[in-house]
Amino acid sequence: MRKVRIVLPIGLVVILLSLWAGTQLAAIATGGGATNAVTKAPAQRALAPVTTAHKVAKKNYLETDIASISVPAFTFTPVGDPITANCPGTSGTCTFEMVQNQQYCYGASGTIYYIAVAVDGGFLAQSPYSGQFASESCDTTAWTYQATGISLGNHSVQFYAYTSAAATVVDYSFVVRVYHP
């Protein structure tokens, strides 16, 4: 029993330091420096292009925040602000690659959670079953989506959380990459 009392606080400290370090790295990546990201408003900035094996992203958008977003049971709840992503050019279409990472906490054991994304109000059919809370109180999930045939111009990308029982999204990070041939 004494071992549990010692290991549990140490484990909690390690988890909290890991979350803090990740937030600091995200702040640095978005040009915010190493300031305390908890006090910063959610950021939406264009990043340098990312090269893939087949294409180069024309634009990258990032939003990240430490939040306390209540997710009622059986409700698609918006997480963060919508990201306005632009498909540039004078002809053709774009591909959007959307990556999200959310940490859920405070759900009851057995609670099922999902992550989802909508482009211009339409949910992508790729919204996965993401996981189920065990006896611990937090879990992190990530997913990558792809939408092709996106027309030229501005488009709204909104990320969502969904659970089978009330829970909380405590932090998140989203990336939208725009590819245009």
Image (cartoon, helix red, strand yellow):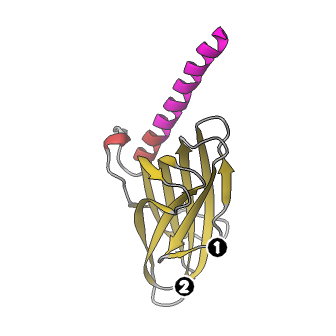
- What type is the residue that disc 2 sits on? Thr
Residue farthest to the top, as pictured = 2
Question: Could you say which disc has been placed on residue 125 in the image?
Answer: 1
Residue stretch rendered in magenta on the structure: 1-22
Give the SS element for disc 1. loop
Q: Residue at x 32, y 46 (%)?
A: 40
Determine which quarter of the picture holds residue 88: bottom left
The reply to whether the magenta stretch includes residue 160 is no
Q: Please state the horizontal and vertical placement of residue 143, each as a whole percent of the image.
A: 62, 58
Among numbered discs 1 and 2, the one appearing first in the sequence: 2
Whether residue 87 is visible to the viewer of this picture, yes or no, is yes
In front: label 1 or label 2 = 1
Q: Using the numbered discs, state the Cα–Cα distance from disc 1 to disc 2 in whole angstroms.
A: 20 Å
Which of 179/132 is in front?
132
Q: Quadrant of the N terminus?
A: top right
Percent position (x, y) of residue 67?
41, 47
**Residue beneath the point at 64% across and 9% down:** 2
Q: Main structural element of the magenta stretch: helix, strand or loop?
A: helix
Q: Who is closer to the viewer here, 26 or 113?
A: 113
Residue 149 location (% of width, % of height): 58, 83
Q: Residues within 10 Å of mark 2 (few under 14, many from 20)?
A: some
- Badge 2 marks a residue whose secondary structure is loop
Q: Which residue is mark 2?
A: 93
Instruction: Assess whether mark 2 and mark 1 are in contact (beta carbons under 8 angstroms).
Output: no
Please tell me which residue lies in front, 48 or 71. Answer: 71
Tell me the amino acid under the disc marked 1. Answer: Ala
Q: Is residue 9 left or right of residue 132?
A: left
Establish if 48 lies above or below 109: below
Check if residue 2 falls in the magenta segment: yes
